[in-house]
Image (spheres, rainbow, N blue to C red):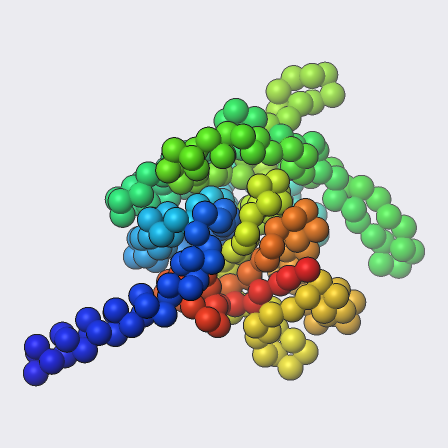
């Protein structure tokens, strides 16, 4: 019985590899930017599975670029250090004390953990922040606020929160050509009004979208803790166009935390990315299912 079961498993594995062949050929040589966030970042087993999938992608001829977040870890460290945070419309105001913690957590602990996890699975990952070689240069982001009663608009100062204005594509291309997997912390370089160097905190999805757009990536995969974008009936959409996305936003179907993710997807598509997928990072091998199977995973947004 054991021999028969083992044979069936081997045949199933061979069949899976055979079915994946057209998708391996389709994505061969493509750049795929993967934004890691949510469940996988807090669970060692999930991180190990993610790292194995990224190493396998590289082995199959796909060129992954990993961008990560770390909001919960930043919040935990700020509480440990008794640094209070102010929020505007749910966005953390990043003062000098906070940006030092943000850089320490993102570019230090989390970035190196992810790179090390990929290396343990046989990949060659290098951890970077957006400050390295001016990988991501930012300008200060001002948050537009609208008074619900009067409709008046004002710009709120979020402190050291940045908006990417340029990406050092050449450096990433050099790393990819050397079979290195870049793992990027969303910390950007910039300048203050007096010309001094400034460190900026960047939203992880925004950083991933900027990198994908600059590199004209074949795919941008936004891993989150939901199954995908849902329609008005609560059903996950397998695919949608920019026009459909705009319509769902206008009718209030896409809202809350999904709204900025879809916004990032739309901007990346307009910058030249072929397709953006919002998918559930909690699902086993979600990245491989999306790239190398017929139906994929999550919601694919196309131009």
Q: Between 174 and 152, which is closer to the camera in this rendering? A: 174
> Does residue 46 appear left or right of residue 38 in this picture?
left
> Does residue 187 appear left or right of residue 159 in this picture?
left
Residue 49 position by quadrant: bottom left
Q: Between 203 and 23, which is closer to the camera in this rendering? A: 23
Give the quarter of the figure containing the C terminus.
bottom right
Where does residue 255 sit, x and y in percent of width and height?
Answer: 68, 65
Where does residue 129 sit, x and y in percent of width and height?
Answer: 49, 33
At 60% from the left and 34% from the top, the residue drawn is: 167
Give the quarter of the figure containing the N terminus.
bottom left
> Does residue 107 appear left or right of residue 231 in this picture?
left
- The answer to whether residue 204 is above or below residue 280 is above
At 51% from the left and 63% from the top, the residue drawn is: 279
At 38% from the left and 37% from the top, the residue drawn is: 180
Q: Between 200 and 56, which is closer to the camera in this rendering? A: 56
At 65% from the left and 37% from the top, the residue drawn is: 164
Where does residue 299 sit, x and y in percent of width and height?
Answer: 57, 67
Residue 249 visible in the shown view: no
Q: How many numbered marks, from 0 up?
A: 0
Residue 291 visible in the shown view: yes
- The answer to whether residue 260 is above or below residue 104 is below
Where does residue 291 sit, x and y in percent of width and height?
Answer: 45, 61
Q: Between 230 and 99, which is closer to the camera in this rendering? A: 230
């Amino acid at each position: 019985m054991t021999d028969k079961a083992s044979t069936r498993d081997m045949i199933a594995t061979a069949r899976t590899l055979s079915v994946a062949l057209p998708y391996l050929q389709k994505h061969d040589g493509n750049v795929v930017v993967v934004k890691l966030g949510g469940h996988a970042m807090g669970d060692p087993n999930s991180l190990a599975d993610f790292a194995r999938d990224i190493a396998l992608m590289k082995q199959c001829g796909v060129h992954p670029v990993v961008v990560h977040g770390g909001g919960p870890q930043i919040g935990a460290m700020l509480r440990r250090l008794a640094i209070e945070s102010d929020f505007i419309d749910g966005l953390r105001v990043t003062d000098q004390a906070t940006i030092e913690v943000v850089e320490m957590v993102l570019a230090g602990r989390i970035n190196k953990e992810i790179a090390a996890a990929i290396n343990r699975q046989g990949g060659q990952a290098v951890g970077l922040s957006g400050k390295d070689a001016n990988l991501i240069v930012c300008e200060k982001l001002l948050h537009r606020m609208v008074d619900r009663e009067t409709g008046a608009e004002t710009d709120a100062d979020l402190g050291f929160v940045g908006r990417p204005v340029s990406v050092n594509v050449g450096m990433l291309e050099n790393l990819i050509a050397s079979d290195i997997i870049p793992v990027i912390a969303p910390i950007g370089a910039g300048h203050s009004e007096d010309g001094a160097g400034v460190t900026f905190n960047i939203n992880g999805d925004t950083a991933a979208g900027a990198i994908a757009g600059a590199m004209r990536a074949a795919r941008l995969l936004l891993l989150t803790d939901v199954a995908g974008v849902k329609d008005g009936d609560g059903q996950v959409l397998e695919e949608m166009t920019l026009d459909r996305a705009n319509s769902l936003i206008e009718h209030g179907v896409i809202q809350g935390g999904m709204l900025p993710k879809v916004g990032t997807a739309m901007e990346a598509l307009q910058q030249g990315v072929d397709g953006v997928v919002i998918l559930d990072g909690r699902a086993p091998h979600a990245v491989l299912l999306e790239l190398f199977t017929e139906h994929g995973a999550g919601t694919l947004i196309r131009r």
